Amino acid sequence: MSITTYEMARILEQLEESPEKVMYGKLLAELGNQSEERIRSAAKQLPLETLRDIIYQFQTVLESRKDENIQLIAQDMKDKGFSIEELEKFLAKK
C-alpha cells in the first residue's frame, strides 16, 4: 500500500513534531534571539492585520501555558520544603 504525497503531507501536518512545525519552532526561536530593534524593524514590514493575528496567536499560547509555569514554581517550592499552608499565610499577609 503506497500513499500519495498529499496524504503524507496531511499525516505529517497532524503530528506534533512534523518537519514544518519543527522548522517554524526553530524560526521563532531564532527570532527570539534577535535584538529588539531587529524584531521591531521586521514587524514594521508586516501588514497590520497579519501582525495583529500573530500577536493574538502568541497571547493564546501564553495563556494556555500559564499553568505550566505555575506547576514549575509549585514544584520548586515543594522541593525547597515549603508547604501550601506556609504559602497561603505569606500570600494572606500581602
Image (spheres, grey):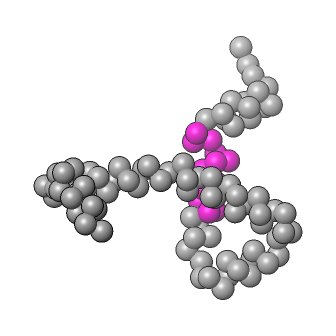
Foreground: 91 or 67? 91
Q: In terms of image quadrants, where is residue 44?
A: bottom right
Q: Bounds of the magenta span?
A: 16-28
Judge from the rendering whether residue 12 lies leftward or rightward of residue 32; answer left or right: right
Residue 66 painted magenta: no
Residue shown at the point (74%, 35%) measured from the top left: 9
Residue at (67% x, 82% y) in the render: 38
Considering every residue shown, the one lying at the far top of the view is: 1
Q: Position of residue 63 (x, y in %)?
A: 55, 53
Quadrant of the snapshot with the C terminus: bottom left
In percent of the image, x 68 and y 30: which residue is there? 11
Q: Nearer the viewer, residue 78 or 13?
A: 78
Task: Using the image, determine if residue 50 lies above or below residue 83.
Answer: below
Furthest residue in direction bottom, as rendered: 37
Q: Image check: 65 left or right of 83?
A: right
Q: Position of residue 71 (x, y in %)?
A: 35, 49
- Write down the quadrant of residue 90 in the picture: bottom left
The answer to whether residue 24 of the structure is visible from this angle is no
Image location of residue 53, percent across then percent down: 76, 58
Say which residue appears at 31% left-offset and 57% top-offset: 73
Q: Residue 80 location, x and y as percent?
A: 16, 58
In this view, the residue farthest toward the front is 93
Provide the major secondary structure of the magenta segment.
helix
10 up-or-down from 94: above or below: above
